């Protein structure tokens, strides 16, 4: 199918992007019968050196994607009436529990997170039992950060968003800190507050131990920048805004955010779709602070699904903005209504050299420079530091607006107030930040987490005219915990 590029002046046909393949590192799955009882494969049990523990920790990150289900739940998509039907996409758009257990599903993500946690716990045991524990300091730091991250993502997908007033009573998810030694171990969900306390404990214990020298390719692991970026996200969600700013200011040497951002309006502007696909989630892209491979069909499905970015939503998200300028994100489409921005491509790994079947993967950025900037800006809004907010927003605009001109595209408080027709300074700053994030992360699933944090209602309209509304207190805003987890005593989310 041909691919087209949309510009403000014309539409021109170009050749389809070519998707390549590469050999991925072996994955640790440890089976999938009991999600909370995963143990690393026996080939990984020799953990007699820091190098071997580091190898195990390469699998301590959730190797699954939340993009398909989170994007379809958000207000970024519409019902095109036609397109590929994929259960995680269709069920999520209709606000139904997803009846699918393979890649791109809640069940797959739940399973992958606890598999990653099992690897982290196994690594921590090896670090503690080593003859010279001091030699494993860096590995211990990575294991703690990885364990914290997987639990943090689980609690924000399967439980209510953190609210200090209710977190002590809201059901959380099991926080697992030891490898499994028994079959059918029973767990309890504890509370959101408990999970956040445990995440914070692991985060603060692990962060000082992280060293980039421990990795040959730091962006596949919790390097220092990625660890600080995680801290900014955690404390933003917890609404501890002073800490968000402190960690953001230490994410890069000399607080150099600008030179580590993605260059959409310069370098990327001269690239073909294939070239952007190649670099976007690449370890050589400085904006990617932590990336992971995940089994997923998103690389082939993005833009082609029935419930996807359509004309109405691309105009809303990538159209007018507070700068008065034009976003530099290149928008393409297959056919007539399959809109997409080239980002995540598929890497297909065959089952064997001569096989015709295999597993599709996508490389996914888990933390980026831009998120650090957004988190800091949002925190500064609540700290009433408007000048710092404007500084970060203008920095972002300088890397995203086509033919950027500092005087012409300057973002001021008055400009935001005029654009939104709202006088309250805090409200317009938050609106601008969320809209900028929406454009930056379109088709990456990130919008869903902002909708959750701010309890923003979501309305979906089917092609047949049926209106579906997900209100702020709707139980369906929590993805359903896999039914199989009930065998371990875990209660499902209410419906």
Image: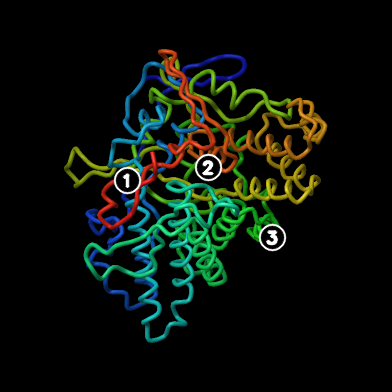
Residue at the (69%, 35%) spot, across then down: 432
Relative image position of residue 157 (x, y in whole percent)? 45, 46
Left or right side of 87 for 270:
right
Label 3 – label 2 distance at C-alpha: 22 Å
Q: How many marks?
A: 3
Left or right side of 439 for 257:
right
Mark nearer the N terminus (3 vs 1): 1
Label 3 – label 1 distance at C-alpha: 36 Å
- Furthest residue in direction bottom, as rendered: 131
Q: Which of pointers 3 and 1 indicates the residue nearer the eye?
A: 1
Mark nearer the N terminus (3 vs 2): 3
Residue at the (46%, 60%) spot, across then down: 221
* Residue 428, above or below 109: above
Residue beneath label 2, please?
A: 449
Q: Is residue 270 visible?
A: yes
Residue 246: mark in rendering: 3
Which SS class for mark 2? Answer: helix
Relative image position of residue 117 (x, y in whole percent)? 37, 61
Which SS class for mark 1? Answer: helix
Mark nearer the N terminus (2 vs 1): 1
* Residue 97, above or below 14: below
Determine the image quadrant of residue 350. Answer: top left
Given contact means CB atoms under 8 Å apart, are the residues at marks 3 and 1 in contact?
no
Q: Which of pointers 3 and 2 indicates the residue nearer the eye?
A: 2
Given contact means CB atoms under 8 Å apart, are the residues at marks 3 and 2 in contact?
no
Of residues 110 and 263, the one drawn nearer to the viewer in this rendering: 110
Residue 107: mark in rendering: 1
Residue at the (50%, 30%) spot, across then down: 341
């Amino acid at each position: 199918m041909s691919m087209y590029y949309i510009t403000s002046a014309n539409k021109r046909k170009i050749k389809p992007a070519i998707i390549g393949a590469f050999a991925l590192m072996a994955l640790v799955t440890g089976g999938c019968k009991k999600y909370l009882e995963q143990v690393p494969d026996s080939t990984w049990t020799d953990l007699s050196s820091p190098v071997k523990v580091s190898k195990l920790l390469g699998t301590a990150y959730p190797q699954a994607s939340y993009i398909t289900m989170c994007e379809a739940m958000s207000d970024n998509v519409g019902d095109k009436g036609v397109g590929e039907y994929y259960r995680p996409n269709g069920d999520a758009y209709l606000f139904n529990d997803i009846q699918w257990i393979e890649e791109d599903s809640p069940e797959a993500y739940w399973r992958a997170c606890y598999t990653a946690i099992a690897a982290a716990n196994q690594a921590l045991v090896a670090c503690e039992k080593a003859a010279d524990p001091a030699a494993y300091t860096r590995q211990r730091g990575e294991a703690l950060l990885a364990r914290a991250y997987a639990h943090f993502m689980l609690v924000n997908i399967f439980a209510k968003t953190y609210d200090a007033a209710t977190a002590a009573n809201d059901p959380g998810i099991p926080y697992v800190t030891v490898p499994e030694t028994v079959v059918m171990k029973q767990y309890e969900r504890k509370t959101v507050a408990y999970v956040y306390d445990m995440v914070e404990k692991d985060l603060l214990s692990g962060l000082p131990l992280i060293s980039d020298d421990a990795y040959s390719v730091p962006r596949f692991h919790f390097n220092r920048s990625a660890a600080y970026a995680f801290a900014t996200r955690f404390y933003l969600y917890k609404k501890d805004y002073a800490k968000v700013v402190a960690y953001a200011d230490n994410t890069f040497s000399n607080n150099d955010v600008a030179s580590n951002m993605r260059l959409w309006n310069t370098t990327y502007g001269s690239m073909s779709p294939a070239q952007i696909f190649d670099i976007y989630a690449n370890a050589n892209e400085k904006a990617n602070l932590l990336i992971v491979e995940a089994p997923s069909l998103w690389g082939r499905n993005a833009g082609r699904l029935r419930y996807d970015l359509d004309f109405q939503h691309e105009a809303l998200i990538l159209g007018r903005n507070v700068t008065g300028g034009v976003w530099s994100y290149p928008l393409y489409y297959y056919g007539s209504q399959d809109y997409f921005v080239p980002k995540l491509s598929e890497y297909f790994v065959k089952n064997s050299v001569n096989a015709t079947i295999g597993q599709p993967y996508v490389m996914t950025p888990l933390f980026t420079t831009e998120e650090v900037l957004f988190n800091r800006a949002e925190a500064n809004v609540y700290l009433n530091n408007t000048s710092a907010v404007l500084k970060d927003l203008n920095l972002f605009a300088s890397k995203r607006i086509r033919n950027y001109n500092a005087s012409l595209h300057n973002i001021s408080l008055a400009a935001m107030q005029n654009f939104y027709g709202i006088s309250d300074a805090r409200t317009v700053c938050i609106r601008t930040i969320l809209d900028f994030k929406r454009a930056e992360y379109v088709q990456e699933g990130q919008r869903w987490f902002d909708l959750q944090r701010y309890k923003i209602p979501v309305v979906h309209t089917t092609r047949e005219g049926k209106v579906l509304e997900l209100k702020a207190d709707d139980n369906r805003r929590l993805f359903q915990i896999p039914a199989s987890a009930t065998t371990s005593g875990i209660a499902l989310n209410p419906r």
